[in-house]
């Protein structure tokens, strides 16, 4: 891998929240960041590129991770400028909330198209590049909800569980080519994700799940609004870039590391009861 001042980063979902904070964090430390967004206009104050005294920069390129053509175009654009991609950070994501019964198949598919298949699409495109280079790093932003499934966020949790399984297998497959793969698992984080969460269309007041769902949603939103800063996540992502042998999973914050440890050691019935008390 190159020194950080020369490393080329392809970062999806860079227009807001964790992605934007990560782009800024890495730029200030000398990385050449190609951030992506479905709508580039208006991102970063309408400027196509930001530079830093460290030599780092952010260049925004359009990308819809649910489109083969768009994904191929984004990867091609980076390669035409740099000739390589050292790190792929799969961060683009969205959330749909509602009971399983109230969530339509089309809504569930939309969730997976972005969170799971979007990451898979980008990973498959950069692997030939990294194999040819003889090195590379793939960092997938998952979630604590990819380890502990949250009621009324089942589709979001399921998409993150799928990413966890994907990276577990990927890590073994690409190791012989000098490519490292790992997961970063944020918990509740203060971003626009809370306000942009999509509510399942059938999750209205007439739903039999309505009262419990609204209570669970209020708890989720409160925890997110009082959660970690996106910069805290960016810091962990940065560490995973720099570490020679990054661990497969890195939770963000001591509290969430402790929660995931308890998930492994406590009886499953007790964990289920605790989750139910908080969110069901």
Image (cartoon, rainbow, N blue to C red):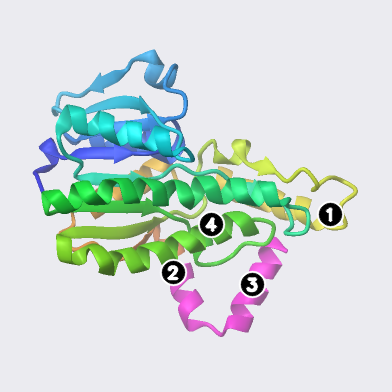
* Residue 97, label in figure: none
Which of the two residues, 244 or 232, is positioned nearer the viewer here?
A: 244
Return the x and y of residue 123 as percentages of the image width and height.
33, 50
> Taking 181 as reference, is 243 left or right?
left
Decide: few, some or many residues near mark 1? Use Cα within 10 Å; few <14, some 14-19, many ≥20. Answer: few
Q: Give the range drawn in magenta.
A: 259-280
Q: What kind of secondary structure does the magenta stretch mostly adopt?
A: helix
* Residue 258, label in figure: 2
Return the x and y of residue 139 as percentages of the image width and height.
31, 52
Decide: few, some or many residues near mark 2? Use Cα within 10 Å; few <14, some 14-19, many ≥20. Answer: few
Q: Residue at x 44, y 69 (%)?
A: 258
User: Vertical placement of 251 versus 234: above or below?
Assistant: below
Q: What element carries label 2?
A: helix
Q: Do the residues labelled 1 and 2 touch (CB within 8 Å)?
A: no
In magenta stretch: residue 220: no
Residue at the spot of label 4? 159
Q: Are marks 3 and 2 in contact (CB under 8 Å)?
A: no
CA separation in Å, label 2 and label 4:
23 Å
Nearer to us: label 2 or label 4: 4
Residue at the spot of label 1? 211
CA separation in Å, label 1 and label 4:
25 Å
CA separation in Å, label 1 and label 2:
31 Å
Which of the two residues, 20 or 63, is positioned nearer the viewer here?
A: 63
Return the x and y of residue 272 as percentages of the image width and height.
64, 75
* Residue 274, label in figure: 3
């Amino acid at each position: 891998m190159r020194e950080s001042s020369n490393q080329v980063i392809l970062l999806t979902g860079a227009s807001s929240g964790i992605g934007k904070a990560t782009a800024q964090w890495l730029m200030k430390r000398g990385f050449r960041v190609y951030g992506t967004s479905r709508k580039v206009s208006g991102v970063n104050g309408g400027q196509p590129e930001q530079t830093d005294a460290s030599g780092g920069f952010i260049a925004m390129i359009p990308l819809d991770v649910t489109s083969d053509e768009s994904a191929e175009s984004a990867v091609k654009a980076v390669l035409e400028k740099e000739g390589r991609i050292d790190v792929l950070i799969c961060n683009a994501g969205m959330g749909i909330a509602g009971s399983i019964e109230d969530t339509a198949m089309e809504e569930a598919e939309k969730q997976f198209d972005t969170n799971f298949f979007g990451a898979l699409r980008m990973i498959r495109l950069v692997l030939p590049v990294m194999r040819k280079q003889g090195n590379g790093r793939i960092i997938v932003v998952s979630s604590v909800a990819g380890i502990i499934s949250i009621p009324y966020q089942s589709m979001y949790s399921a998409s993150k569980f799928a990413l966890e399984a994907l990276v577990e297998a990927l890590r073994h497959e690409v190791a012989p080519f000098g490519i490292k793969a790992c997961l970063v698992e944020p918990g509740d984080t203060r971003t626009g994700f809370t306000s942009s969460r999509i509510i399942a269309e059938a999750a209205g007041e007439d739903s039999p799940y309505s009262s419990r769902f609204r209570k669970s949603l209020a708890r989720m939103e409160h925890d997110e609004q009082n959660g970690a800063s996106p910069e805290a996540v960016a810091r962990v992502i940065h560490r995973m870039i720099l570490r020679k042998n990054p661990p497969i999973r890195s939770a963000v914050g001591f509290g969430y590391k402790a929660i995931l440890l308890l998930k492994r050691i406590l009886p499953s019935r007790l964990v289920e009861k605790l989750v139910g008390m908080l969110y069901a």
